[in-house]
Amino acid sequence: GMRTRAKKQADGSYVVKGSKAWITNAGIADYYVVMAITDPDKGAKGISAFLVDAGTPGLIVDKEEDKMGMRSSDTHGLTFDDMKLPADALLGEEGKGFVYAMEGLDGGRISCAAISTGIAEHAMQIAKEYSLQCTAFGKPIAKFQGVSFKLANMSMYIDAMNLMLYDAAALKATGARCSKLAAEAKLLASTHTTQICLDAIQILGGNGYSKEYNVERLLRDNKLMEIGEGTNEILRVIIGSAVLAEK
């Protein structure tokens, strides 16, 4: 679905026209890696990558996104208004941009798994401390199975998240392809962290619904992990395809 075009000129330079959405750090970056179509007839093999300086004429940083969560992360759209790039702005080979992007996604998905796991640990800690301090019927609410079972599930899934996260990271560190494992780690962590945050809010009751106790923010922040670097639906496509291709 990419529409941004980079048209090669007679002198070897490129003129880029189009736009991008949801670019992290777009408002503060000094350099950008921009993917653009250089050969519309070749599909994914017609996409190239370019290194663009922030001061390049024709590069326009659009308004900051007012997001549901991850509000400390700087996010903008970008517009390329006949942006001219020199020939040496091309990264690697022409037509290899999609390959470079796919190679980067595995690492990004492992990072997302790490973020979700950290959010889950934070949510559980808040819920645990609250359940030990808050009393009902003369005893801490942590003593009630309805609460302790929620904490037990949190601990189980967080341990599983950590194991899968480090397994994927270790495989990535060897230089081997880790697309299936990275997708599995992100899918497991992002999905169960959302539930852990919901359960933490439930343990805190009305206080969980208040911004004072932070768990509502953790829920909003983690929602991005179910969308960014490949939605949970896309991850299931990747995992399913890998499973069916295995001998």
Image: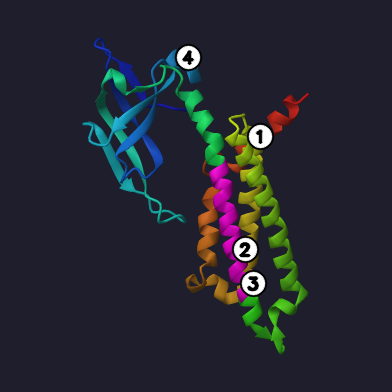
Q: Earlier in the sequence, mark 2 or mark 1?
A: 1
Q: CA distance from mark 3 to mark 1?
A: 33 Å
Q: How is the image coloured?
A: rainbow
| Percent x, y of residue 118 | 57, 56
* Main secondary structure of the magenta stretch: helix
Q: What kind of residue is marked 2? A: Leu
Q: Earlier in the sequence, mark 4 or mark 2?
A: 4
Q: Quadrant of residue 152?
A: bottom right
Instruction: Between label 2 and label 3, give the one nearer the viewer.
Output: 3
Q: CA distance from mark 4 to mark 2?
A: 45 Å
The residue wearing badge 1 is 180
Q: Earlier in the sequence, mark 3 or mark 4?
A: 4
The residue wearing badge 3 is 128
The residue wearing badge 2 is 198
Q: Which residues are magenta?
A: 110-129
Q: CA distance from mark 1 to mark 4?
A: 26 Å
Disc 3: CA contacts within 10 A as few (<14), some (14-19) or many (>=20): many
Q: Are marks 3 and 1 in contact (CB under 8 Å)?
A: no
The residue wearing badge 4 is 42
* SS at badge 1: helix
Disc 2: CA contacts within 10 A as few (<14), some (14-19) or many (>=20): some
